[in-house]
Image: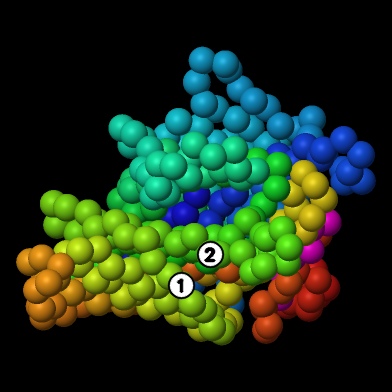
Amino acid sequence: MVVFEPEEGRAYWFRYTILAPLPGVATTPAATLWAAFFDLGRPEPVAFKRILPLGAFDRGPRDRFSIGLGSARLGHGHCSGEGTVGSRRYAWDLRFTPAGAPERLEPPLLRLLPLPAHVTRPNAHVAFEGVVTVDGEQRPIARAPGLQFHTWGTRLPEDIRWLRCPRFAEDESARLEALSVRLARRLLGGLPAPWLSAISLHIGAGEIRSRGRASDGAGELAFHGETWRHGIHVRAWCHPRMLTGYVYRDPHGREHHVAQTDVGSCEVAIRSRLHPLARWGDTRRLTNRGSTAIEFHAPEPLPGVRYIAWDAERLRSLSRDGPE
């Protein structure tokens, strides 16, 4: 779950997972609750995990989606949970009206392949209501844009670059998602594996979808794609101090480093033409400041980012409460 407060420069990220290792893999099964609280007005994000035994997972009733991880709940239109960092308490209790159908970004053919990892977006553009508690302070949440998506499989892709922007200053109804992924860095024979990239921009009453290419730098992502009518260039970035890191583990026992922020910024340049042989028209620009989600997934850590280890519940560093 990602919940944005664009006007406040704040955002929240919650993740509910279970890990069932493959036979013979020396990894303990677990149910894990993850959370990150981003605020541009604070020096850095607050992030933590709760590692629970797999028996703490409650699959809920068979006739509807309603799961539990200990006291935390995730269901059809609601989510809740809590945790502590030192003496500070963090919690959320949120509701949303579910979408009528999942949103699709990947090409249809890709969804039919027997891939080791899958993703769906059952609630890709919803509004959240409720309360988030940050360091004991209760914050009312009203019509906050956000999304819920679900991933599952037996092996995580080696590399993922992802961004999501829920609205833009020039058009609050516009929204953007861009994704670039490669399952492995090398093909059979040692050849470099290709990246698969897709861009989806909802604007006005229509949608622009494009395959494309991506590039990244220190805390920065760029995507470029073209259709016969439109050209799209996307640049997203964040201050490195606003990235928080987690180590994921897949059922094969492989570890992946995930660096993310939900208070990044984004600029989109859109060019249009009447037909493939026509000249490009004037460039339209969309901007977002402080409410863009950006993620970097890779086997190795991103320089300058601190990561919560797989077997840890918070960063192993010093805070005002002492060692964490």
Give the image location of residue 28, x and y in percent. 87, 43
Q: Residue at x 67, y 68 (%)?
A: 191
Give the image location of residue 11, x and y in percent. 46, 63
- In the rendered structure, which segment of residues is drawn in magenta? 306-311
- One can see residue 11 in this view: no
* Magenta stretch: dominant secondary structure: loop
Pointer 1 local density, CA inside 10 Å: few below 14, some 14–19, many at least 20: many
Pointer 2 local density, CA inside 10 Å: few below 14, some 14–19, many at least 20: some
- One can see residue 224 in this view: yes
Q: Which residue is mark 2?
A: 195
Q: Nearer the viewer, residue 72 or 271?
A: 271
Q: Amino acid at mark 1?
A: Ala
Q: What kind of element bears circle 2?
A: loop
Q: Nearer the viewer, residue 275 or 296?
A: 275
Q: Which residue is mark 1?
A: 214
Number of marks? 2
Q: Is residue 148 magenta?
A: no
Do the residues under discs 1 and 2 have CB atoms within 8 angstroms? yes
- Judge left or right: residue 318 versus residue 10: right
Precedes in sequence: disc 1 or disc 2: 2
In this view, 275 is above or below 105: below
Spatial separation of the CA atoms under disc 1 and disc 2: 8 Å
